[in-house]
Image: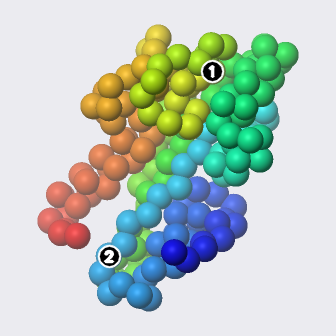
Amino acid sequence: EKEIIEDGSNYRENALIKANAYAHEINKPIIADDSGIEIDALNGKPGLESARFAASMGGHDKAIKYIIEQVKKTGINTARFICSIVLVNEENKPLTFEAVVNGRISLIPKGKEGFGYDPIFIPDGLDKTYAELIEEEKNKLSHRGKALLKLITYLKINQKVI
């Protein structure tokens, strides 16, 4: 498995880096994504570093404890998940489909579904964390699900088949 260095300045650039890493090997359209959680108590971090942040803390459980401490300390619990999906098509004109889900950080991790930061993220309009939602619910509400729906809609409208 090749090592891909995601050093873009935003989610779209990181998704494009992933797609382009394989574009020359595969002569077909490629879809790649990047996503992250931005927590206002951490001044928008971990953001693009979401996976590496958890790893640097010794795993998601420890990262979540740290996040909760910071939310308690600052009194700021707002956050958002962002996803950017890139389609590199035959014309090599990348198309981007993005979605943002605003929410807040739960001071108590809840739920067993999902992964990563899901047990502490409550999307606006709900009283459940991502990790408390069944897969079908989360797919409709999540940042990745919404970005994917935009991609699927584009493909249907343009009658493209991947």
**Residue 19: percent from left, percent from top:** 47, 72
**Residue 152: percent from left, percent from top:** 25, 54
Circle 1 SS class: strand
Circle 2 SS class: loop
- Nearest to N terminus: mark 2 or mark 1: 2
**Residue 34: percent from left, percent from top:** 53, 55
For residue 63, the mark is: none
* Kind of residue at badge 1: Ile
Residue 52 vs 18, above or below: the answer is: above
Number of marks: 2
Residue 96 vs 57, above or below: the answer is: below
Specify the quadrant of the image occupied by residue 80.
top right
* Kind of residue at badge 2: Pro
Residue 159 vs 136, above or below: the answer is: below
Q: Residues within 10 Å of mark 2 (few under 14, many from 20)?
A: some
For residue 29, the mark is: 2
Question: In front: 55, or 102?
Answer: 55
Left or right of residue 76, residue 132 in this image: left
The extreme right residue here reads 73
Specify the quadrant of the image occupied by residue 61.
top right
For residue 105, the mark is: 1
Q: Residues within 10 Å of mark 1 (few under 14, many from 20)?
A: many
